[in-house]
Image (cartoon, rainbow, N blue to C red):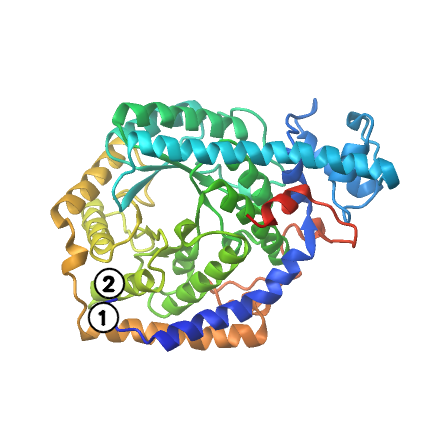
Amino acid sequence: MKLGLDPAVVRRARDLAARAAEPVIEMARTHTTVSVERAVLRLAGVTGADADGIPWVNRIVDAVRDQVGLEHGVTLPFFAAENWRSMRFGLPTGAERDLALARARAAVGAGVARIDRNRADRDRLLARHGDPDKPWIYLIVATGDIHQDIPQAQAAAREGADVIAVIRSTGQSLLDYVPEGATRQGYAGTYATQENFRLMRAALDEVSAELGRYVRLTNYASGLCMPEIAALAGLERLDMMLNDCMYGIIFRDINPRRTFVDQRFSRQIHARAGIVVNTGEDNYLTTADAIDAAHTVVASQLLNERFGHEAGLADAQLGLGHAFEINPQIPDSFRLELAHAQLVRELFPDAPLKYMPPTKHMTGNIFAGYLLDAFFNLAGVMTGQSIILIGMMTEGIHTPWLSDRDLALENVRYVRRAAGDLSEDFTPGPFIRERATRVLAETVDLLHRVADDGLLNAIADGVFGVTRRPADGGRGLDGVVEKAAGYVNPATEILEAAP
């Protein structure tokens, strides 16, 4: 610990974050959503779509909601149906209920067992191929065509990328269904589907064996189908998932209640699967000033830590996000960046932090952008960040070419090699220590206000990302259902059972 942070202040910040989070956690415990129920069916092995391309899980959940209601969950009506394809459902009682419950627990249990086997397979492959040293180099592919993504991802791994993120097609977070099959027509990204996950995982396993180091795969469990995509990620052995409902609330106008309920269930699955969750605090700094709003990032990280722990995530799975977004024209901008990065590193010493590159102040001057990315890479090494998403000098100009990615990888390889263990030698001076202490104090003040006023009210007031999102606004609220006394969810039973 280099900043000399007051342990009492740190404890106070965590206590306030826990108090602010508790009402939202209680809401998530007592409600379900259409997407949670669809995820349970996916864990039970329901796949495919009807002749119109509507996934069966959507058809089933919609029919149960219309005919029975979802307050008891989807599994009892589904597993009591003689022929679910008839789309006629009722709520079973007595012996019929007992039989449906036994069938549901067996089917969902088989899905969770598959997730457990995938986690064991990951551990086995890490032991066989080796785990790259940190910071892991994180690179995005985004062609829209899974069959073009695969050779790009393999080429990136050969050039040094440790984590491949397949960015989703624009707008998929707003779709209230998950497409089926392999897709080739995404816009500025590739659709997240189970088959696309399977294809990319197999391709990265192939290149992992070739290179002698395990290459991780990332996608996005966010938006209106957050729980379903989390389930598919566990079923196909993804290693990281972008999973932060605040991003969907603020930047996609998804209803806050819907996303907090969805987030809890999705993180329970991630916890079981051994998946590292990447949060989205870095996005706040694209709409708010990186200096003035630094404390909002730290406050959100502390809230995300509490939400993650409650859902079962270990510290080693909390890939909390922050970003190198201070205006480079400001005097001492690099020193301020070091203060923020070191503060986050010391507050969460066991978390695999994800550090995001400059985007907001990339001007189109590729030479200045390349230099700015080098400073970002240096800050990441100096402050011991865990995951570095490499910056592109063509950020904001066009979707990066393979040659752009190659140059970006060369940049981070050089800095990482030249700096070595510079974090051991980096000792912050008074400027950096005082800045970090001030941001922490502002964080405590903000969390106190959030704990008193309520997190949903804080989001409605635009505290995070300067965007106001009321608790009863946005997309997807009609998919939230309060649980009845007899609610059944076999997945929750398994995931919340004592180990």
Viewer-proximal residue among 316 and 445 = 316
Which residue is the site of mark 2? 338
| Image quadrant in which the N terminus is located | bottom left
Residue 48, given in percent of the width and then of the height, sits at 64, 25
Residue, far left: 418
User: Visible in this render: residue 22?
Assistant: yes
Which type of secondary structure does the marked residue at label 1 adopt? helix
- Looking at the picture, does residue 320 appear above or below residue 405? below
How many residues crowd mark 2 within 10 Å: few (<14), some (14–19), many (20+)?
Answer: many
Q: Position of residue 496 (x, y in %)?
A: 60, 50
Q: Which residue is mark 1?
A: 432
Q: Amino acid at mark 2?
A: Leu
- Above or below, 248 relative to 165: below
Residue at 58% in and 31% down = 179
Mark closer to the chain start, 2 or 1: 2
Disc 2 versus disc 1: distance between alpha carbons? Answer: 7 Å
- Asked if marks 2 and 1 touch (Cβ < 8 Å), the reply is yes
Lateral position of residue 60 relative to residue 266, left or right = right
Instruction: Look at 16% across and 61% down and name the residue there.
Output: 426
